[in-house]
């Protein structure tokens, strides 16, 4: 449904013959409005896709990544992901980033999950709305952000600042690192502020949870 509402190129939609039609009435209406062909197939045919489909599947063209420069035209929150290799985590981060108003995501071309059917589904459709750039070097990307007036904030267990005390600039970059290694050392050195999320006796959060908490803190300051 979110893919159909966005500007994504949807080639066709397939529905299971066993689905209750009123439950997918909005999807059918959008297909007809946009002149997207749709078919009714046996549930087993959708099962062959190997993904959880809930009785409906959309077949889309590959996602078009955008340039970093196009993201830097905006004022707002940019998100850089360093070493997020789990597509479920990537999708969950995209979902939170879109919910809290991020203007774009930056991924490295190496050692990173990409936008595929798993991460797209985990994003609950947010990936259809959020511009994503892929870059060869994250350090160069951070330098480019700084050159355009962005302040850079990194989530790090050893950060000197607690997140609730951080005052985010309107033009902000938040860097989220992997759960096992965190943000790379070179990127840490380029951060203007390193912060940690206060918690109880447990000292670790899922990367997507830490990201969501961070994005919300920015959101409540600039909504």
Image (tube, helix red, strand yellow):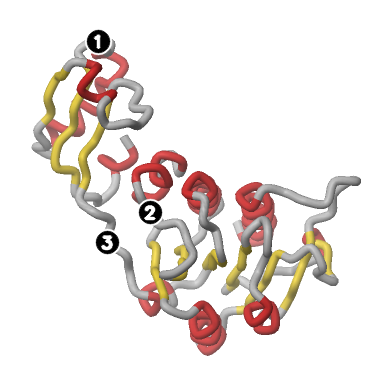
Lower sequence index among marks 1 and 3? 1
C-alpha distance separating marks 2 and 3: 10 Å
Q: Are marks 1 and 2 in contact (CB under 8 Å)?
A: no
Mark number, residue 10: none
Going 66% across and 56% down the picture, which residue do you hit? 179
Q: Residues within 10 Å of mark 3 (few under 14, many from 20)?
A: few
Q: Position of residue 21 (x, y in %)?
A: 24, 13
The secondary element bearing badge 2 is classed as: loop
Q: Which residue is mark 1?
A: 18
**Mark whose residue sits in front, 2 or 3:** 2
The residue at which mark 3 appears reads as 64
Image coords of residue 118 (percent x, y): 40, 42
**Closer to the camera in the image, 36 or 82:** 82
The residues tagged by marks 1 and 2 sit, at their Cα atoms, a distance apart of 30 Å
Query: 23 above or below 7?
Result: above
Q: Residues within 10 Å of mark 2 (few under 14, many from 20)?
A: many
| Residue at the disc numbered 2 | 115
Give the image location of residue 32, x and y in percent: 12, 31
For residue 220, say whether it is visible.
no
Q: Is residue 54 above or below residue 119?
A: above
Measure how far apart labels 1 and 3 are at the Cα level: 33 Å
Task: Find numbered disc 1 in the image and state the secondary structure of the residue it sits on.
Answer: loop
Query: Is the residue 161 above or below the residue 101 in the image?
Result: below
Residue 211 image-quadrant placement: bottom right
Q: Say whether disc 1 or disc 2 marks the residue closer to the N-terminus.
A: 1
Name the residue located 74 percent from the left edge and 69 percent from the top edge.
167
């Amino acid at each position: 449904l979110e893919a159909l509402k966005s500007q994504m190129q949807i080639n066709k939609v397939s529905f299971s013959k066993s689905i209750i039609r009123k439950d997918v009435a909005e999807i059918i209406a959008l297909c007809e409005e946009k002149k997207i062909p749709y078919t009714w197939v046996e549930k087993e045919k959708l099962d062959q896709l190997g993904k959880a489909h809930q009785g409906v599947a959309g077949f889309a063209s590959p996602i078009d990544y955008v340039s970093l420069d196009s993201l830097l035209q905006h004022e707002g929150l940019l998100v850089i992901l360093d070493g997020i290799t789990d597509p479920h985590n990537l999708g969950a981060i995209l979902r939170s980033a879109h919910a809290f108003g991020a203007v774009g995501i930056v991924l490295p071309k190496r050692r990173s999950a990409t936008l595929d059917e798993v991460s797209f589904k985990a994003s609950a459709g947010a990936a259809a709305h959020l511009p994503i750039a892929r870059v060869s070097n994250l350090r160069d990307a951070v330098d480019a952000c700084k050159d355009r007036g962005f302040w850079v904030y990194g989530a790090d267990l050893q950060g000197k600042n607690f997140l609730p005390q951080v005052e985010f600039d309107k033009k902000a970059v938040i860097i989220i690192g992997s759960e096992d290694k965190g943000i790379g050392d070179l990127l840490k050195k380029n951060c203007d502020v390193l912060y940690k999320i206060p918690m109880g006796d447990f000292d670790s959060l899922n990367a997507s949870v830490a990201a969501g908490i961070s994005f919300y803190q920015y959101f409540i300051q600039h909504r």
